[in-house]
Amino acid sequence: MSGMSVDKDMRSSLGERRVREMKKMMKKKNAPYFFLAPMLVLFAVFMIYPIIDSLILSFQDFTEGNYVFCGLQNYITMFHDPVFWKSLKNTFIYLAVQVPVMVVLSLLLGVLVEQAFLKFRSGFRMSIFLPSVTALVAYAIVFKLLFNTDFGLVNHALTALGFDGVDWLNTVWGARSAIIIGITWRWTGYNTIIMIAGLKNIPMELYESAEIDGASFFQKFVYITVPMVKSIIVFVSITSTIGTLQLFDESFILTNGGPNNATITIGHYLYNTGFSYYKFGYAAAISYALVVIIGVLSFVQFRITKGGENE
Amino acid sequence: MMDKRKKINISHVITYVVLIVAAFVFLFPFYFMFVSATNSNADILSAAPKLFFGTHLSENLKNLNERLDLGRILLNSGILTVTYTVLAMLIHAMSGYAMAKYEFKGKGIIFGIIMLTMMIPGQVMYVPLFKLMNNIGWANTYQAVILPGLAGAFGMFLMRQNMLSFPTSLIEAARIDGYGEFAIFIKVVMPSMKPALGAMGIYMFMSMWNNFMWPLIILGTKSMYNFPVALSMLEGVAWRKDYGVIMLATVFAVLPILIIFLVFQKQFVAGVMGGAVKE
């Protein structure tokens, strides 16, 4: 019988009695709890506990070797902390510039690379995807060299073309631009993959009938492609927003938050607060500010776009 | 007729031009990294930087080995990544299976809570986790890096989505044949989950190999660093900065994942797409 081979396998490894015991325990009724158990234990210890502990910590201050309740003090400090506001502002600048640019770029690249006539499609696809497997630290280091003011290739290219070089990493907008360019380079391909998944679901007939009606490439893009992948665009926008709000590696490696905190992100400031200055309570408060911002932004984005879907 | 044809050809040309420019922009940093790894610091920083492969590879390698224990870091990254990937595949397949194919008390609430935490950034957990790991003596250990990442909802969700479409009648038939619940999972369900497992495995592999912020926080000694942390330390040293050496280290951090990507491109794409699949 087919069931025999299974039993034999298990017996050899566990011993007959334990198999019988296990079988008794693993009845259909409680089986799901066994399957879930490892996940639930990990989830409770490494997810639920830290989330709650972080909230408690945000109301505490570490003084004289003890954590003491300090009410809203950490949050009040945060509201008066210029660096916190700077990090918030920077993060929102990245968000406002980078997310729309990347959404448009990834959709456009997705459309182009899926064109039926295209040759070397897999080659183009691969080159678009490749940045998204690279370690953030690794690409940030390469970009740091490319954007170096004195001997970076970007400035060499600019001067060769007759432009002035830019002091990328040491000026406020130069450094911010470098980070935005970096993130766009790293994540556009990732989102293109997701866009392609949506594009493949669009029935070809729609394009064919539009072509008969004489629609241009641009018209097809605006009136067929965009509406048909709307839910994917929403998904990409929300996940990119959440990702951008948590930026750390780029700020840490590429600019080290500088010059004068002009590029520091919330995640980077949280790291500095918690693990350079060891102000755990304050870092926890910052992290909860991040939770609230992500929650509100996701809710708003979801709301706006859901209204559109019902049309 | 002629007019229309001409128009199409122009749009073809534009498509190719845009894609070729995009491919150049995406690939050039890789090329530059590989080339620079074979050049000396002086070549890289010269007024006319060398953009072709040089002869400094072995010297860069020698210098890199003096600055960090390459073998040890490769071992650390390997242990972390492989252990994490294997455990993630097993744990998330099991929990996803429970969520997809069983009805039990508390299912809705458990699923809801786990999914809700997808919204909470990992950075919220880092301070309490740092305290916790120090309290139980796990600071600077492999398990401190591996275990917290396993509690994420993504893997469970991905496996659940894939298992929902597995025919329940096959599971019922196996029960009638006398299979135990665990045997059904291993011998009946899992074999048909290979594509989904592959997709998730590649995704998990990639995310752990590239993991930086949490390892930076919890790994305290040089001998425990993974590649991203070691790289950041190497780059962070201002004095005697040798870009040839740094680029070579970057190559070591990137190359394994590039090879894996080229071999398992399909699974990687499926893993990324899996997150976007609507219910």
Image (tube, grey):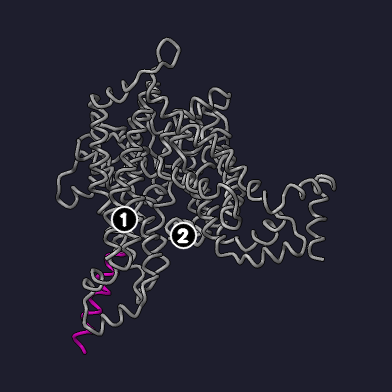
Between the residue at mark 1 and the residue at mark 2, the CA separation in whole angstroms equals: 21 Å
User: Which of A40/B258 is in front?
Assistant: A40
- Circle 1: element type: helix
Whether tag 1 and tag 2 are in contact, CB under 8 A, the answer is no
**Label 2 is found on which chain of the structure?**
B
Of the residues shown, which amino acid type is indicated by label 2? Val
Mark 2 closeness class: few <14, some 14–19, many ≥20 residues within 10 Å: some
Residue shown at 20%/36% (left/top)?
A172
Q: Report the residue that reaches farthest toward the bottom.
A: B1
Taking the image as shown, residue B113 lies to the left or right of residue B243, namely: right
The magenta span reads B1-19
User: Which of A72/A263 is in front?
Assistant: A72
Residue denoted by label 2: B269
- The quarter of the picture where residue A44 lies is top right
Residue shown at 33%/51% (left/top)?
A238
Find out whether residue B5 is within the magenta segment: yes
**Label 1 is found on which chain of the structure?**
B
| Quarter of the C terminus of chain B within the rendering | bottom left
Residue denoted by label 1: B25
Residue B146 drawn at (x, y percent): 55, 38
Taking the image as shown, residue B62 lies to the left or right of residue A278, namely: right
Instruction: Report the disc number at residue B222.
Output: none
Q: Report the residue that reaches farthest toward the top.
A: A64
Above or below, A220 against B171 in this view is below
Labels 1 and 2 within one chain: yes
- Circle 2: element type: helix
- For marks 1 and 2 on the same chain, the one whose residue lies earlier in the sequence: 1
Find out whether residue A5 is within the magenta segment: no
Q: Which SS does the magenta portion mostly show?
A: helix
Residue shown at 21%/76% (left/top)?
A216
